[in-house]
Amino acid sequence: DVKVTQSSRYLVKRTGEKVFLECVQDMDHENMFWYRQDPGLGLRLIYFSYDVKMKEKGDIPEGYSVSREKKERFSLILESASTNQTSMYLCASSWDQEGGSPLHFGNGTRLTVT
Amino acid sequence: GNSVTQMEGPVTLSEEAFLTINCTYTATGYPSLFWYVQYPGEGLQLLLKATKADDKGSNKGFEATYRKETTSFHLEKGSVQVSDSAVYFCARSGGSYIPTFGRGTSLIVHP
């Protein structure tokens, strides 16, 4: 089974801090994704990556950046955390380039910014 | 662009009731269709998928049929259990590897 591991389940940070959310997958998947999940809004795509060192903006990239230095690891960075970034963050990976394979998700990181 | 519309919840049922959660998608291209389930405190996991018209995906008693003529992929289960209480997401992809998700439907099953 594919395993997608997010480094923290719960995180509490202060406004203005730089925050790193880490995600590692163990199945050599090409594609990796970061979503945030908020009540009533479903899943919103922040950034995705289809290869090492490649990244593309999703629907809501403002206030975030990402890093993919190795194929298995995809990091989400909040440059200066704000209270409106309090959310559940989900990392996912998939292997194909044509959209037929499903996403595999981590268990999420619930981030609170105070 | 691509979109997925699913019925709003919560859907509240008694144990052993019949479940339908409606999902429709935009017909651009030839998408694959998915249902994901999210149990409390967890990430999403694939429940079932269908890759072409008239395919039926099934898993754990859940079924959904890819209906091209109605651009629908409704999720059904004949007899729900309390353990089925979760949030269900319909999604499409294809043409691009970036999937499009519906907003999710919360299911609450009472004993």
Image (spheres, coloured by chain):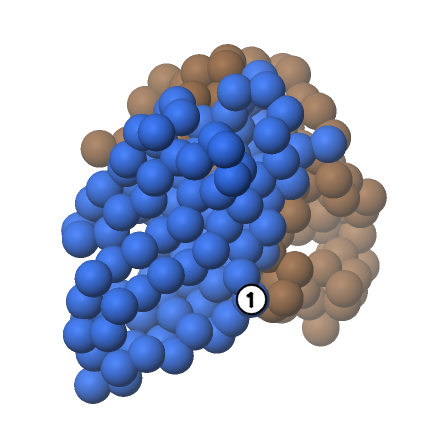
User: Which residue corresponds to the image point at 33% horizontal and 44% vertical from the top-left?
Assistant: B64
Q: Residues within 10 Å of mark 1 (few under 14, many from 20)?
A: some
Quarter holding residue B19: bottom left
Q: Residue furthest front?
A: B69
Numbered circles on residues, count: 1
Chain for numbered disc 1 = B
Q: Quarter of the image for the C terminus of chain A: give it.
A: bottom right
Residue name at image x 37 percent, y 61 percent: B20
Whether residue A24 is visible: no
- Please give the name of the residue rendered at 23% of the width and 42% of the height, measured from the top-left corner: B58
Percent across and percent down for residue B54 are: 34, 29
Which residue is at the front of the view, B73 or A79?
A: B73
Q: Which colour represents chain B?
A: blue
Whether residue A7 is situated above or below residue B108 in the rendered picture:
above
* Quarter of the figure with residue B2: top right
Horizontal and vertical percent position of residue B47: 30, 45
Front one among A110 and B54: B54
Q: Residue tagged by mark 1?
A: B8
Q: Which amino acid does label 1 sit on?
A: Glu
Q: In which quarter of the image is residue B29?
A: top right
Q: In this view, does B18 lie above or below A104?
A: below
Colour of chain A, in one word, is: brown
Q: Is residue A36 left or right of residue A57?
A: left
In the rendered image, residue A5, in percent from the top left (x then y), is placed at 38, 42
Query: Please, what secondary structure does the residue beneath circle 1 have?
Result: loop
Q: Which residue is drawn at 20% across and 85% down?
A: B111
Image quadrant holding the N terminus of chain A, namely: top left
Query: Is residue A70 shown left or right of residue B1?
Result: left
Query: In this view of the protein, can residue A53 be seen by the observer?
Result: yes
